[in-house]
Amino acid sequence: MRRWILLCLSFFVVPAHAVLNIEITGAGEHQTPVSLVRFAGDAATAQGLLDIVGSDLIRTGLFKLVDPAGKTPHEPRDIRPSEWVGVEAVLIGSIQAMDDGKVAVKFRLLDLVRNAELLSQVVTAKEDQVRAIGHRIADMVYERLTGSPGVFSTRIAYVSRDEGVYRLVVADSDGDNEQALLTSKEPIMSPSWSPDGRQIAYVSFEKRRAMVYVQSLSSRMRTLIADFPGSNSAPAWSPDGTQIAMVLTRDGESQIYVANSNGGRLRRITYSDAIDTEPSFSPDGQSLLFTSDRGGSPQIYRVSIEGGSVERLTFESGNAFSPRFHPDGKSFVFAHFGDGVFHIAVHDLESRQTQILTAGGWEKKPSFAPNGKMILFATEVQGRGILATVSSDGRVKQKMVAQRGDIREPMWGPFLK
Amino acid sequence: MMKKLILSVLLLNLLAACSSNPPKEEVAEPATTSAATTEAPAADAQAATATDAQAAADAQAAADAQAALMEKNSVYFPFDVDAVQDADRETIMNHAEYLASHPDAKVRVEGNADERGSSEYNLGLGQRRAKNTKRALVLGGASDSQIETVSYGEEKPRCSEHNEACWAQNRRADINYSAQ
């Protein structure tokens, strides 16, 4: 326990079998002091669980983990409030092995200020799913203490490039548990999650030009949905999962089209002599954000999915790329390029204000976590592409450094249903 | 076999000569049997009979011409610009003339961009550069159907440092001859 707290204090968490190292800077405006007590039961399993819940909570910058200092309560009656001064909430619980090889994890979150039980739950799973259980517990703790659903159980997708081999990777939101969905000697771009999290659309150059595929995560079966002459790219799912917006050059310039998610019933949305690309559906499915250089430099625009009039949204000096809606539809995140660097920025649709969230660098391809609280993007450290996140208010930043290769084109997945 | 090839090459050259003006579409469909004339391997040439020696030499000359052409097969663009530059006029004309006189030759024009943009925007930019390079080749006498355009955007950089010398290398379109 002490060793683990030290690791957390150094803001450098290295879970077992980690593919990525995680470095966190900054803190939330208010950090809730929370104590996590190692659960009763098998010590190794309990420690593994604690590490996952702890690193999940720490990464948000919203919590301060308080060392239980040798106290090991497992039931509410074991807690004497006088021993927990300065701690707002404490997580306790136990792990029980069951006959069928599964484990039952019983846990409680107690509010020591108001002397109330915030959570009391039992989660059962196979013993090798400790990571998943840990993320679920962290999700519930996060939701009870912040009011927003946690995103620790969600997944991310990205492309890794290592010595000429491209891999389309799906991983847990902390970068661990990575699985390659596709390996290719030719580039892969623009992974896009279906709203149910079961499929990923992406661009692959395996047939020597850009074509759009849709692949199932469970069966690994995939469908080529766009192979028109020229480039086929930038897939984006509609919120109901029935349609995919994409960019085709089959009629000349890069223009935005919408098709059914199997590629059928294709219809053109934009008509310009410019590059119109990177469509992103609004949460209500009625409009698309996109990047266009129709005004002379790349900026963000909006168009109804019925087509028709186009509204320019950004008027930045420099260029604006890669818009993605906040889940509430009231703002969007984009990559701003100016004075030789990329920043991650958020544009509020009502106030029409743009806020730069990051210090700047090779920061590209932002996407919101499904709770809207964090933004995942690609950046670079010492010439290598890595994943990074920033909280939506810009206060908390973390970098996830892969042990090898270049990481690009990240996209945060949806809540799993 | 070689005679047939020579004949078809001659025919095609004649056809091309007659049709340097539109209509282009019909002319540009080469007989599939004529493929590979420009790349007769040297080993075969030595084994050929005396009558075929000249043909082999011609083929070798053609291969040499193409090899010389390939030494300069890239055209370069300023930042966020997709128009072919005057500096590359000679490169374009050399390839256009070669394509015009070798109607069975086919090229893939591959457009590329530097990293200062999103990968998708750069894919669009590379596509434009490829398309404009193709247009310049066609204006120079190449046939529309000899040229395929593709874009790699910023996905296949020739140089991977963050500086102008490197970016300038990556803002280019490559004229690559297809293996026949």
Image: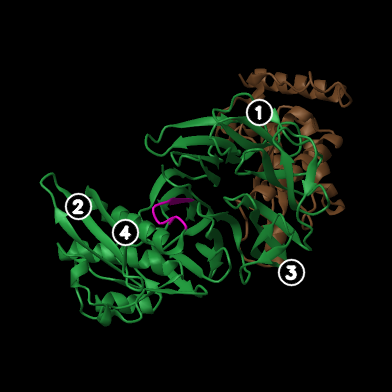
Chain colours: A green, B brown
Magenta residues (range): A148-157
| Residue at 29%, 74% in the rendered image | A4
| Residue at 40%, 60% in the rendered image | A144
Choose mark 1 or mark 2, whichever is in front.
2
Q: Nearer the viewer, residue B92 or B78?
A: B78
Image-based side of A76 in relation to B62, left or right? left
Q: SS class of the residue under badge 3?
A: loop
State the residue position of label 3.
A339
State the residue position of label 2.
A104
Determine whether label 4 and label 2 are within 8 Å by CB: no
Residue A13 lies, in percent from the top left, at 36, 70
Q: Please, which chain is the residue tagged with disc 4 on?
A: A
Please tell me whether residue A171 is drawn above or below residue A390 in the rendered image: above
Residue B96 lies, in percent from the top left, at 80, 38
Q: Quadrant location of residue B36?
A: top right
Residue B159 lies, in percent from the top left, at 62, 60
State the residue position of label 1.
B37
